[in-house]
Image (cartoon, rainbow, N blue to C red):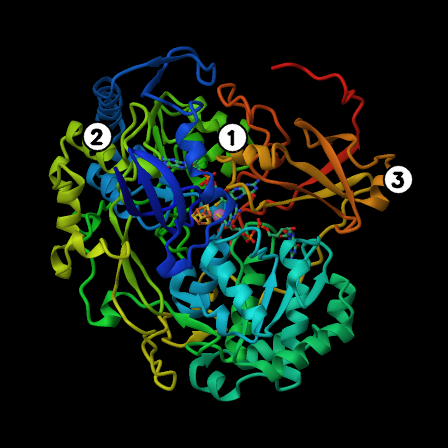
Amino acid sequence: MSKTVWSMCGMCSVRCPIKVEVEDDKVKWIEGNPHILGGALCAKGSAGNALYNDPERPQTPLIRRGGRGAGRWDPVSWETAIDYVGEKLENIINKYGARSIVLSCRGGPFVDLFKAFIHALGSPNFTNHDSACGRNVHHASLSVYGLGRKGFVYDIKNAKHLVLFGRNILSSLRVAEVNQVMDMLDAGGSLTYVDVRQTLTGIKATRFFQVRPGTDYALLLGMIHQVIKSGAYDKEFVEKYCVGFDKLAEFVEQYTPEWAAKECGVKAKKILDFVDEIGEQRPKVIFHPGWMLSRYKDSFYASRALHILNVLMGNVETEGGQIFAKGPGDCGKKGLRSLDANIPKPEEKRADGVGWRYKHFDKGPGLFHLFYDAMITEDPYPVKALICYRHDPFTCFPDIQAQKEALDNCDLLVSIDAHYSEFGWYSDVILPESIYLERDSMIATQKGPKPRFIVRRQAVPPKYNTKPCWEIFKLLADRLGVGQYFPYNTIEELWEWQLEPTGYKIEDFDEKGFVPLADKPVMYDRDNLEGKFKTPSGKIELVSSKLEEVGLPSFKPYESPLHPPKGQFRLIFGRAPVHAHSHTINNPLLNELMPENTLWINWRAAQKLGISQGDLVDVMADSVKATVKAHVTDFIHPEAVYTVHGFGRQVPLQSRAYHAGMADQKLQEGLLLSMDPAGGGLCLCEKFVTVRKSPRNPKRRVEL
Ligand SMILES: Nc1nc2c(c(=O)[nH]1)N[C@H]1C(S)=C(S)[C@@H](COP(=O)(O)OP(=O)(O)OC[C@H]3O[C@@H](n4cnc5c(=O)[nH]c(N)nc54)[C@H](O)[C@@H]3O)O[C@H]1N2
Ligand SMILES: Nc1nc2c(c(=O)[nH]1)N[C@H]1C(S)=C(S)[C@@H](COP(=O)(O)OP(=O)(O)OC[C@H]3O[C@@H](n4cnc5c(=O)[nH]c(N)nc54)[C@H](O)[C@@H]3O)O[C@H]1N2
Ligand code: SF4
Ligand SMILES: [Mo]
């Protein structure tokens, strides 16, 4: 029997809407939802079936037998596994209180369930990966608009100019955004790309600026200086909605394009030409504020500068600019009922200090890496259990040895994952989740100019003894005596409960896979945006009252990044279009496309070290060494070496990924608590490594 299933991709955290063709419980075809993505899908999304058929994933719950990380597991039933976790958690609650439990997840549209679970237990400690990803951008956005990173969407398709600072939009991709960029280019739009190396995005760009690593902020200050000096900004908009423009103008006075050129290596004339061009094209000019900006000591301020340039372009709430993300309320509709909103909020302070020790940070998911500090110091109180749902701290955070030392203070580590993660391999229990093609998910709201409700539907039955997360958390909640907060037994009951206030039914999703809440883009009146900016002043705060209140500057004076010592390089990283972090490396199809990563190194630097294309090189940090092939190229700044994140896996049951390539995060020793005090993001590009030609013989292969 054949059927069409509307669902959501799960091969990366973008979660594109998809259409799955199924015949006799087998997936025959997957494509992007034609109503939203015109059928487009990326390579990873197309490899979902290979994941489904891959036996190298956990097939039943596992309880650790040997020491942590020894890799000896007892396969058990779900009853036994839930009971084991339940009993351990009960003991921890009795001894230390519920607050000593931390739940981390991957963020995204389904967090309502995970937040509800941890809050129902009575712990405030909900967290996610974001201090190693977008926290600097999020906090920068909050400081300017009072709205977080997802408060705006970018109308790239209709823009005249898209400016990207290290936002490798065509490789580190979301399908909908790639479609928009290609449409913009087809319509004659300009694309300026800034990176320390050439990329897929750079080669499609109309202008490419190569910068010295860590100098984006200098280039941005030079640009702001020139925009203000040449009057290439929207004076009316700035006057009406902003506070602190004069202070900004005063601050950037010293940062001329000529000064910036010396810092970042882009010629002053090119900066002037660029500003002339955007002056003509505004307001349809978008400076992308960045995404993965847990990079440098000033990445938060670089992101603030990007936000400020958007404001100067006057692109807020305009076609081809940045548009407030609208929700159901903006369409005169009711939102979904929330599980978490039904639960009394725990009154305890967060163990990561967010909200009380660090008052300028958004409480939301807090800052994961600071829980490690609490595990070691027991300040403000002991942390004794860590549950990770769809999150692998050993891949996400630097310095695995330091993490293990902190985790050894915990009585319980649980990994709820569809794969063996590095953290899972070290944990006490693995609860295997059914992969996205095998499971239904809660209904989610997607905000935007045309908001919608969307749902993931199960395409095929689970191949192994796995369960979907809505059921796993329900079982745990029942076992721990808080089942009343999860008022459902089946997914249909949960959907009905969520939809109840909206008046929609699950059948309304059958036609297109989603329920549109507006027919055409909902736009606010740009001349009347009062009340839309959620800063303390209600204005766009170029001078941020929240930052100043805690003694942090709104405009940070520029400090030049260190040059690496002789023989060393700054280790930088990024993504490849065919992999999603670490969890696709072992996918049979994607592994075939890219089985290992390499170390990009500038040819001049390589020549000095006697390294040729394809040679094995040793990359050395303080106590960790990795050996990979060199990719010798013109297209990277000589101060940096680059690798694709996600490789260097050490789980023996993943035979294709095992020890293939190198893991950047393992070399980032000493960076686990390298937090930017203003943005909360880690400074993951602040590591120098030594590179040498490896004495290892590439022809002598070790069979594994
Ligand atoms: N050194 C260094 N560190 C980095 C980065 C870097 O480039 N370099 N990148 C940073 C960035 S941008 C991010 S977002 C983070 C990402 O780090 P994480 O948040 O840890 O995210 P992922 O690697 O995407 O996936 C985490 C886990 O989700 C599991 N998973 C996948 N699908 C499913 C599923 O359907 N169900 C369940 N339950 N689990 C599933 C995977 O197997 C994996 O173990 O890392 C950050 N850390
Ligand atoms: N295919 C694929 N797509 C993904 C993901 C994935 O895993 N795979 N993950 C998603 C996630 S979670 C995220 S956060 C985003 C991240 O997407 P992006 O924010 O675009 O991040 P990256 O790909 O990590 O890095 C982009 C570039 O930053 C450059 N860079 C390093 N130092 C500097 C510098 O000093 N200045 C400048 N200008 N550039 C520099 C690197 O060379 C790299 O090319 O991608 C998302 N999309
Ligand atoms: S970007 Fe690719 S892998 Fe990620 S959700 Fe979309 S189709 Fe799936
Ligand atoms: Mo990310």
Evaluate if marks 2 and 3 touch, with contact meaning CB atoms under 8 Å apart. no
Q: Secondary structure at mark 1?
A: helix
**Residue at x-position 47% and y-position 53%:** 135
Residue 399 at what x, y percent from top left?
56, 33
14 horizontally vs 310: left or right: left
> Which structural element holds mark 2?
helix
The CA distance from mark 1 to mark 3 is 38 Å
**What residue sits right under mark 1 in the picture?**
588
- Label 3 sits on residue: 608
The amino acid type found where label 1 is placed reads: Pro
> Ligand 2 near label 3 (Cβ, under 8 Å)?
no
Residue 279 percent across, percent down from the top left? 61, 82
- Looking at the rendered structure, the secondary structure element under dot 3 is helix
- Residue 268 location, quadrant: bottom right
Q: Earlier in the sequence, mark 2 or mark 3?
A: 2
Quadrant of the image for the N terminus?
top left
Residue matched to label 2: 476
